Image (cartoon, grey):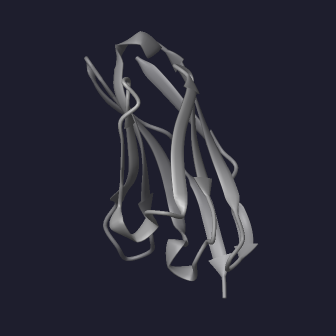
């Protein structure tokens, strides 16, 4: 099993920045990809950014040029969010796809006020 714990959410004004962290524990060597998803009230959960073990990254069109996903060790995932917009307000979830299934963190609230 893999456990994921997010941190770093909060309230910022539009145009501000936040950095989310996700700490993985357990069978981390079974992880293939790690991602950040978000879910706004009344909306479906959507993929924000993804990074593979090889370092390849993909982003949702709405965050390209503003968000950066990185992973400095097999245990730690980051999401640097710059120039935040009110439409980025959501609960952000860390997700890991492993050889034995996928796992989710508990989520962290990000709110960008206008």
Nearer the observer, 27 or 42: 27
Q: Where is residue 99 in the image (x, y as percent from the top left)?
A: 25, 17
Q: Position of residue 105 (x, y in %)?
A: 50, 39
Res 9 → quadrant: bottom right
**Extreme-front residue of the structure:** 65
Residue 58 relative to residue 82: left or right: left
Q: Does residue 98 lie above or below 15 as drawn?
A: above
Q: Which residue is drawn at 40% across and 70% down?
A: 62
Nearer the observer, 108 or 52: 52
Total label count?
0
Res 27 → quadrant: top left
The answer to whether residue 27 is visible is no
Residue 92 relative to residue 16: left or right: left
Q: Does residue 78 lie above or below 72 as drawn?
A: below
Q: Which residue is drawn at 73% across and 69% down?
A: 11
Quadrant containing the C terminus is bottom right
Q: Does residue 108 lie above or below 16 as drawn?
A: above
Quadrant containing the N terminus is top left
Q: Which residue is drawn at 59% across and 35% down?
A: 5
Q: Position of residue 23 (x, y in %)?
A: 60, 29
The answer to whether residue 89 is visible is yes
Q: Where is residue 107 in the image (x, y as percent from the top left)?
A: 54, 50
**Extreme-bottom residue of the structure:** 114
């Amino acid at each position: 099993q893999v456990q994921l714990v997010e941190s770093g959410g909060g309230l910022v004004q539009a145009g501000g920045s936040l950095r989310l962290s996700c700490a993985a524990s357990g069978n981390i060597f079974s992880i293939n990809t790690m991602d950040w998803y978000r879910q706004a009230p009344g909306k479906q959960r959507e993929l924000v950014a993804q990074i593979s073990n090889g370092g390849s990254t993909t982003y949702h069109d709405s965050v390209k040029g503003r968000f950066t996903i990185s992973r400095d060790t097999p245990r730690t995932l980051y999401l640097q969010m710059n120039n935040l917009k009110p439409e980025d307000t959501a609960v952000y979830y860390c997700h890991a796809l492993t050889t034995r299934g996928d796992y989710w963190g508990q989520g962290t609230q990000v709110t960008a006020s206008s």
